[in-house]
Image (cartoon, rainbow, N blue to C red):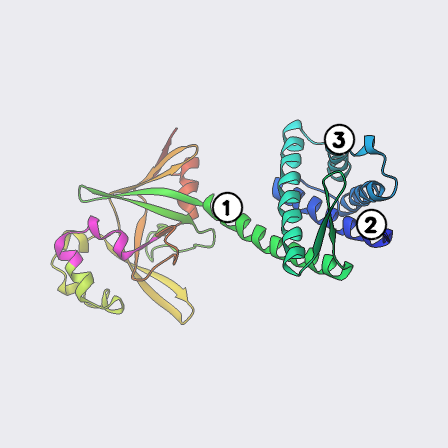
Amino acid sequence: MYIYADIILAVNVVMNSFILILTGWSAGIDYKVWRAITAAFLGGVYSLGEVTVGIALLYTPMAKALVSVIIIYIAFGKHSWRSFIVSIVWFYIIAFLIGGAVFGWLFFVGASYTTVPGNEVWITASWQHIVMGTLLVMLLFLVALRRVKADTFRRQLIYQVIVYYGGRQERLMALLDTGNRLFTATGQTPVVVVEHKAIETLLSEAAKSYLKEHLPAMWLVDMGQCHDQAWLDRVQCIPFRGVGGSSMLLGFRPDRMVVVTKKGRIETDSVVIGVYSGSIDAAGAYNALLHPGILQFGSGKEGANICA
């Protein structure tokens, strides 16, 4: 049997580097690429020794666990115990997922396996298949992880919002839109954009009928046909710039609005609800866009207060 030491070492270094970099990224730990590559190289040398030197004592499960801890320490340096443990957990999760995916690829392309004395299973595959499978799995795993990280980050920006108007209330899920710079034309009041269907229950029958019976483009034009004068007194025009140019959005002042945060509840009456006729999120995870100025009110601005 021929052992291609250079190929074994190269594949291990690439895989280990990828796993260590993903570990640092997933655990939120700062790292230097050269340290990760150095640790990956040492791990590759250790793996190569298993098929060349074969000293059983160095390759027991306990020894392998100890070596992996040393490799992680070399890759990321000195951190808090919590960060170190988190990095170890992520290292094994990623290593097992990638390792299992590579084995699945090898069997998919027709790699053969035989059982040798000692109940060991040897897999026979070309180095081209191993390299191709490794690169493919790394690419797919990276795409999936980026998607998971993006979704996780987005969920951290979603807040529960409670809007009060006319003795009624409606609970919304609002995404903190850091790019939202919408203010009313007069008074510079921040605007929270909400789907029309999400705030229908707050409105009177007259206001609901008016919005349903008129095209969104005519909401501000035909306001004289709405018979809810109390609501009309609260309606405001909100200028905004879209893809097609400048336009106006219909908005109204609620009695108050409460934003539920991890630190407490932010309550304000200095806000305007911008009524959006379409769907804000196709997946339905949220139905409103929260103005960042609302959260800043919690720092002590006039018109808002925060209760822990």
Query: Which residue, given by chain and number where applicable, does mark 1 sit on?
Result: 152
Q: Label 3, on which residue?
A: 66
Q: Earlier in the sequence, mark 3 or mark 1?
A: 3
N-terminal of the pair, mark 3 or mark 2, is: 2
Q: Secondary structure at mark 2?
A: helix
Chain part drawn in magenta: 193-208
29 to the left or right of 241: right
Residue at 35%, 67% (x, y): give it.
247
Q: Position of residue 185 (x, y in %)?
A: 34, 58
Could you tell me the amino acid type at mark 3?
Leu
Local SS, label 3: helix
Q: Nearer the viewer, residue 22 or 247?
A: 22
Residue 9 shows which numbered tag? 2
Density class for disc 3 (Cα within 10 Å; few <14, some 14-19, many ≥20) is few
Dominant SS type (magenta): helix
Measured in 3D between alpha carbons, the distance from the residue under mark 3 to the one under mark 2, in whole angstroms, is 20 Å
The kind of residue tagged 2 is Leu
Instruction: Report the number of numbered marks.
Output: 3
